[in-house]
Amino acid sequence: MTSHRSIPFLVFLFQVIEPFGSALASDWLGWRGANRDGVSRESEWLTDWPKSGPEILWRARVGMGFSSFAVEGGRLFTMGHKDGLDTVHCLDTETGEGVWNFDYEAPIYERGAEGGPTATPTLHGDKVYTLSRTGLLLCLDRKSGEKIWERDLVNDFEVEIPHYGFACSPLAYHGRLIIDAGKIIAFDLESGNTIWETEAFKAGYSSPVPFEIEGQSYVANFNADSLKILKSESGDVVSSASWETSSEINVATPIIQDGKIFISSGFGMGCALYDASDPTNLVRLWRNHNMHTHFSNCVLWDGFIYGFDGHVTRDEGFLTCLDFETGETRWKDDQVRKGSLIIAGGHILALLETGELIVAKATPEGFQEESRSHILGGRCWTPPVLSDGKIYSRNVKGDLICLDVRQSE
């Protein structure tokens, strides 16, 4: 395995949508997948497990953190922290063996949880892009792990590190790398040069999502106190909707479909749906308290929103189904709580905080469990990933497990 070490010049102590690129159905190019919607395009996978659970292909250790996975071309990318170093890992998806890693000095950044990186690597072409909690933005060669360029957000843009550190997973879109860093900033994918930046505001813990209206490209960004719509070419903010959450904790990535944008947060804020068919004039269609996403994200499938409603650190976080158009609750299951999920082929794949992995039908007719297996110990806040018939899951300690759910031929 190739190992690289980098010491940034200053280390501070103090996650209609356009498909990206030409990804295959099984590829998962970064945070919430190729379309940033939490939906895997795989439909042929094993959902009916034996009592012993699906076959374990391999295990690995990747260090402390909450970073999810990017998977393409037989390689998996994630991040972790150990002994004063953040590490970007590249692993072989068949064996779990390390292909290369890239290290840099960083504080563990414990704030109410165990610490470690929170953003997920982004794959685009022959490069991988990562962001640390203290604002080190990296572009690495995907095959070798060699550093191509880096930017120090705090030094270069005079932005403040959020209380829980930077958590935005970079968005690669139309030749730009777009992040929320207290300003929304677009970098050239190849050189790292700044293309545009907005005025300063407080960063949230969400990640931007692109969409198109009448041939014009936009980005929706959920920052600390509002939903903002920007032109992706220029960075011009064309509209904004106030959403002031306690402790400035807006985490969930916006969900966009047919010119409508769904957002949700915890601390009593709830959820809302906006009409963005005219991006210069966000119109709220409804708002209610049927979904309060604290740390996790919802997924839209066939007209219905699925997510965990409630505060993660309390006895809440119930798996819930809402009608996307009306916001009405279709069902809530108080026996399935505190987790994160994706959807694949009409099936919910949810990893609970306790390390239980659950498969259930994605249907508004009620919770219909299909399989369940306890796969990890410790605290599990990172959403699972399904790619090429394999499920990848981790806990905050950095225990990573790969499960085989390929259907027999």
Image: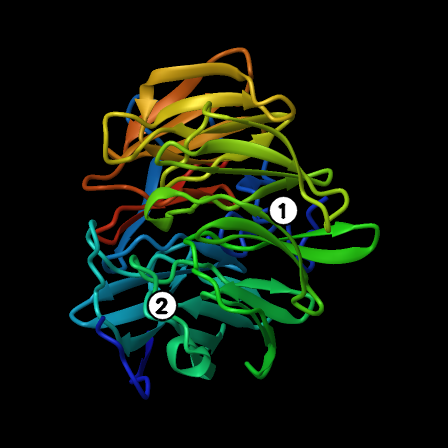
Q: Quadrant of the N terminus?
A: bottom left
At x 32% / y 29%, what residue is drawn? 53
Name the amino acid, label 2. Answer: Ser
Residue nearer the viewer, 164 or 137 = 164
Distance (Cα) linking label 2 and label 1: 29 Å
Within-10-Å neighbours for mark 1: few <14, some 14–19, many 20+: few
At x 49% / y 56%, what residue is drawn? 71
On screen, residue 383 versus residue 288, left or right, reads: left
Within-10-Å neighbours for mark 2: few <14, some 14–19, many 20+: many
The numbered disc on residue 128 is: none
Q: Is residue 398 above or below residue 338?
A: below
Question: Which of pointers 2 and 1 indicates the residue nearer the eye?
Answer: 2
User: Is residue 45 visible in this depiction of the protein?
Assistant: no
Q: Secondary structure at mark 2?
A: loop
Q: Earlier in the sequence, mark 2 or mark 1?
A: 1
Q: Is residue 51 above or below residue 14?
A: above
User: Is residue 38 visible in this depiction of the protein?
Assistant: yes
x and y percent of residue 269 in the render?
42, 34
x and y percent of residue 229 in the render?
64, 54
On screen, residue 47 versus residue 52, left or right, reads: right
**Residue that label 2 marks:** 132
The numbered disc on residue 25 is: 1
Name the amino acid, label 1. Answer: Ala
At x 73% / y 38%, what residue is drawn? 258
Q: Quadrant of the C terminus?
A: top right
x and y percent of residue 324 in the render?
61, 26
Is the residue under label 1 in contact with that under label 2 (CB below 8 Å)?
A: no
Q: Secondary structure at mark 1?
A: loop
